[in-house]
Each structure stands twice: as C-alpha cells, then as structure tokens.
Amino acid sequence: MAIHAHKHGDESNDRLQQRFKKQVQKSGILKMLRERGTHKRKLTRRLQRVRALKREGYRAANKKKQFYSNM
C-alpha cells in the first residue's frame, strides 16, 4: 500500500508535503502501524462480559434520554 505524491506544475514543496501528509492520514497507515507495534493481550471472558454489560447500560440510558430529554 504505497502512497505517491508527484508535483503538479508550479506547486510548492510545502504544498506537496501537505498533500502527501493528508493522503497518509486518510489511508490510516500510521494508525495501523502503531497498533501493530505493540502487543495487546486478549481480554478475558469475564472482562469482555463486564464491558459489554456496561456498554449496554450506557446505550439504554442514552436511548431513554432520547425520548425523555429533561432527564
């Protein structure tokens, strides 16, 4: 997944660099490389369950807020 940026006509070097940087950010390559760079331990089933229940609680609260805006 290579990214190329070639100069367009009278385009300045600064502008070319900005365009290249934008392409890199949009592609998500840096984010992917940072994630790969560190080892992440898999979550235990217990922790997954706890987080899922917490998430469900937040979603229920937000859904309630949606209909009763004064809460």
Image (spheres, grey):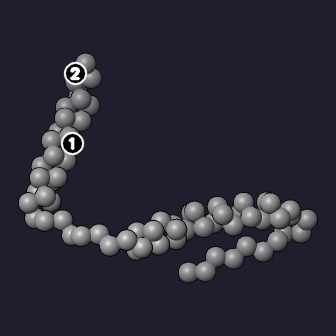
Residue at the image point whose x is 47% and y is 72% from the top: 33
Q: Is residue 30 left or right of residue 63?
A: right
Q: Looking at the rendered structure, which numbered label has been put on residue 59? A: 1
Q: Is residue 42 left or right of residue 23?
A: left
Splitting the image into 4 quarters, where does residue 47 fall? bottom left
Q: Is residue 4 left or right of residue 38?
A: right
What is the quadrant of the N terminus in the image?
Answer: bottom right
Q: What amino acid does circle 1 point to?
A: Arg
Residue at the image point whose x is 8% and y is 60% from the top: 46
Residue 32 in view of the camera? no
Q: Nearer the viewer, residue 36 or 67?
A: 36
User: Is disc 2 surrounded by few (<14), some (14 to 19) or many (20+) residues within 10 Å?
Assistant: few
Q: Position of residue 41 (x, y in %)?
A: 24, 70
Residue at the limit of the structure toward the top, as seen here = 70
Q: Position of residue 61 (x, y in %)?
A: 19, 35
Q: Is residue 52 above or below residue 44?
A: above
Residue 3 in view of the camera? yes
In space, the residues marked 2 and 1 are separated at their CA atoms by 15 Å
Q: Looking at the rendered structure, which numbered label has been put on residue 1? A: none
Q: What amino acid does circle 2 point to?
A: Met
Q: Position of residue 37 (x, y in %)?
A: 42, 73
Secondary structure, mark 1, is helix
Q: Position of residue 28 (x, y in %)?
A: 51, 67
Q: Nearer the viewer, residue 58 or 37?
A: 37
Q: Is residue 2 above or below residue 15?
A: below
Q: Is residue 53 left or right of residue 59?
A: left
Q: Mark 2 and 1 residues: CB-CB less than 8 Å, in contact? A: no
What is the quadrant of the C terminus in the image?
Answer: top left
Residue at the image point whose x is 15% and y is 53% from the top: 52
Residue bearing the label numbered 2: 71
Residue at the limit of the structure toward the left, as seen here = 46
Residue at the image point whose x is 37% and y is 71% from the top: 38
